[in-house]
């Protein structure tokens, strides 16, 4: 391993918690030398549980053993390969989640046959035996069995064995949303089998992790609106489960109600008027339920919430008559699990009359390749890159080494000013201020003690629908709209460049961005 890689690894590992390192070693040693056999008998078939309402999953099972995940369709013919890895690990994971059991329309008999086929091939499963797919699949199986009133000893037997495997492989080595999903699923397993051991594990995880992972303003601490939607959906399902099945009478339901109220309030605050959420950090369209679906579901469960005042998450939403502006002035989070973070401090999105104008590039893949690396870099966001360095060192798909920290944050009635130290290795602070009094004015200052000029680049990515963009001296004009962007300062060059906008996983569209090369200061005025 070369010196550069060792440095990256050091600055990645130093943020991990001892528990993560311990469990990585624990799982490695146990998996290598102490493999466990989970083929044990279910003590007794469970009594039926009640499932009502909820949100239907999007249609991913098509017909004749064809599945569509992440905008890619695969047909298996007569024999489904549940270990199929030809389209990447995330596609395989989705196949093993069994979300399709609860899609809007699926034949019950066919769905049951898919479960039975999976059970027949259980001994050969690979990804399907990992804790994260077990967690999601367990919830989907239980919801499907309950709402269709299916009682099957063979399915119950295998489901129980999967939960025993999950219990022994909880993702303490990852923490974050993975462990929270483990906890959600263990709660479903506990209620389905009326298993006190499962319940004790679920109760402990949910209390600890929700207290830690849900910030004071209601955001999930990994700061991806998509994952926030996914985890809120699962939380609402847990509340639905407990309300309809009065097996336990303790404080857990009230606790979950409180967290759901905060999460719903944050989601309402960061959702645009057109119903979309900002595509910041790892975020993609058509993966999670929509904000409208989630907020309606919360109301059906009698969860009363108000729009949150954004704070600890570091996100700010400006909504006025003609535009909406979403701004990131927060740290990458959390320190010990930044796998879904991008190098995007001070980036922003801008919508004009509910239509996207300046956008985040988004996410099109989780594969560890050059595309994913590029989509996480500073130059793929509406912020400033100094001397061609990333603010935060994103690498290897889901890792971050050195990361930018907010040095100060000042907020007024219509102004936000902040600085980050992502370039401290070259002796630089980047300060950006937003003024929304009349027009939108963005001021960038490169603060340093060095005498020579610093080479900086400010990026502005436009939605693919913005077709005709022209640069006229120090202005950017857009045909067919009154919008105008004017630049002032120590400007060296203004270029119009191409980029790939992420319209979903494995789905991109050509679009254009403006790159402004400048020295120490840049004033950007957006006239609408």
Image (cartoon, rainbow, N blue to C red):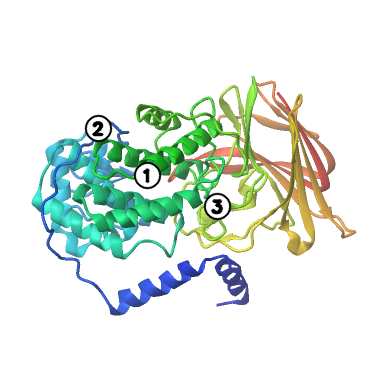
Q: Earlier in the sequence, mark 1 or mark 2?
A: 2
Q: Nearer the viewer, residue 36 or 428?
A: 36
From the image, state whether disc 3 or disc 1 is nearer to you: 1
Q: Position of residue 385 (x, y in %)?
A: 71, 51
Query: SS at mark 3?
Result: loop
Quadrant for the C terminus, please. top right
* x and y percentages locating residue 169 in the rendered image: 32, 64
Query: Image quarter for residue 143?
Result: top left
**Of the image marks 3 and 1, the number of the one nearer the N terminus:** 1
230 to the left or right of 51: right
Q: Secondary structure at mark 2?
A: loop
In the rendered image, the vertical position of residue 10 relative to residue 528, given as above or below? below
Q: Nearer the viewer, residue 332 or 63?
A: 332
Q: Secondary structure at mark 1?
A: loop
Question: Horizontal and vertical percent for residue 308?
Answer: 56, 33
Q: Is residue 219 visible?
A: yes
Label 1 neighbourhood size at 10 Å, few (<14), some (14-19), many (20+)? Answer: few
Residue denoted by label 3: 341
Which residue appears at 31% of the width and 43% of the height?
68
The circle on residue 356 is none
Give the labeled residue for mark 1. Answer: 251
- Give above or below for 84 relative to 484: below
Q: Give whichever of discs 2 and 3 has the lower sequence position.
A: 2
Identify residue for label 2: 52
State the CA–CA distance, disc 1 to disc 2.
Answer: 22 Å
């Amino acid at each position: 391993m070369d010196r550069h890689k060792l440095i990256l690894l050091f600055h990645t590992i130093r943020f991990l918690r001892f528990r993560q390192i311990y469990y990585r070693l624990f799982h490695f040693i146990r998996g290598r030398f102490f493999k466990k056999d989970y083929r044990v008998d279910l003590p007794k078939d469970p009594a039926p549980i009640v499932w009502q309402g909820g949100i239907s999953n999007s249609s991913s099972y098509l017909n004749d053993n064809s599945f569509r995940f992440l905008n890619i369709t695969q047909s298996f013919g007569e024999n489904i390969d549940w270990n199929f890895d030809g389209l990447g690990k995330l596609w395989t994971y989705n196949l093993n989640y069994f979300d399709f059991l609860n899609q809007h329309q699926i034949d019950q008999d066919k769905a049951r046959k898919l479960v039975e086929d999976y059970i027949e091939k259980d001994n050969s499963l690979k990804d399907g035996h990992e804790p994260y797919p077990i967690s999601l699949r367990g919830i989907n199986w239980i919801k499907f069995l309950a709402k269709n009133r299916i009682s099957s000893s063979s399915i119950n037997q295998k489901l129980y064995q999967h939960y025993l495997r999950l219990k022994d492989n909880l993702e303490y080595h990852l923490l974050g949303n993975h462990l929270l999903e483990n906890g959600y699923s263990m709660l479903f397993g506990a209620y389905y089998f009326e298993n006190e051991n499962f319940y004790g594990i679920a109760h402990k995880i949910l209390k600890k992790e929700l207290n830690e992972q849900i910030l004071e303003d209601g955001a999930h601490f990994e700061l991806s609106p998509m994952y926030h939607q996914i985890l809120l959906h699962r939380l609402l399902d847990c509340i639905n489960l407990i309300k309809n099945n009065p097996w336990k009478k303790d404080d857990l339901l009230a606790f979950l109600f409180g967290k759901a109220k905060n999460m719903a309030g944050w989601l309402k605050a960061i959702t645009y008027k057109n119903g979309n959420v900002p595509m910041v950090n790892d975020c993609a369209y058509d993966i999670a339920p929509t904000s409208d679906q989630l907020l309606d579901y919360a109301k059906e469960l009698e969860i009363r919430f108000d729009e949150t005042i954004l704070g600890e998450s570091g996100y700010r939403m400006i909504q006025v008559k003609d535009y909406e502006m979403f701004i990131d002035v927060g740290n990458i989070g959390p320190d010990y699990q930044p796998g879904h973070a991008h190098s995007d401090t001070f980036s922003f999105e801008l919508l004009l009359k509910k239509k996207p104008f300046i956008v985040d590039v988004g996410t099109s893949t989780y594969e560890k390749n050059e595309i994913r690396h590029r989509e996480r870099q500073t130059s793929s966001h509406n912020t400033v890159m100094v001397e061609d360095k990333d603010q935060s060192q994103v690498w290897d798909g889901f890792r971050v080494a050195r990361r930018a920290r907010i040095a100060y944050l000042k907020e007024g009635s219509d102004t936000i000013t902040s600085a980050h130290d992502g370039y401290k290795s070259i002796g630089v602070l980047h300060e950006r201020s937003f003024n929304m009094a009349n027009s939108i004015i963005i001021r960038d200052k490169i603060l340093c003690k060095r005498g020579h000029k610093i080479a900086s680049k400010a990026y502005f990515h436009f939605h693919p629908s913005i077709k005709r963009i022209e640069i006229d001296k120090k202005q950017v004009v857009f045909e067919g709209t009154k919008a105008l962007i004017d630049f002032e300062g120590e400007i060296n060059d203004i270029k119009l460049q191409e980029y790939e906008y992420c319209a979903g996983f494995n789905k991109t569209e050509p679009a254009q961005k403006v790159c402004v090369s400048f020295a120490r200061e840049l004033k950007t005025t957006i006239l609408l």
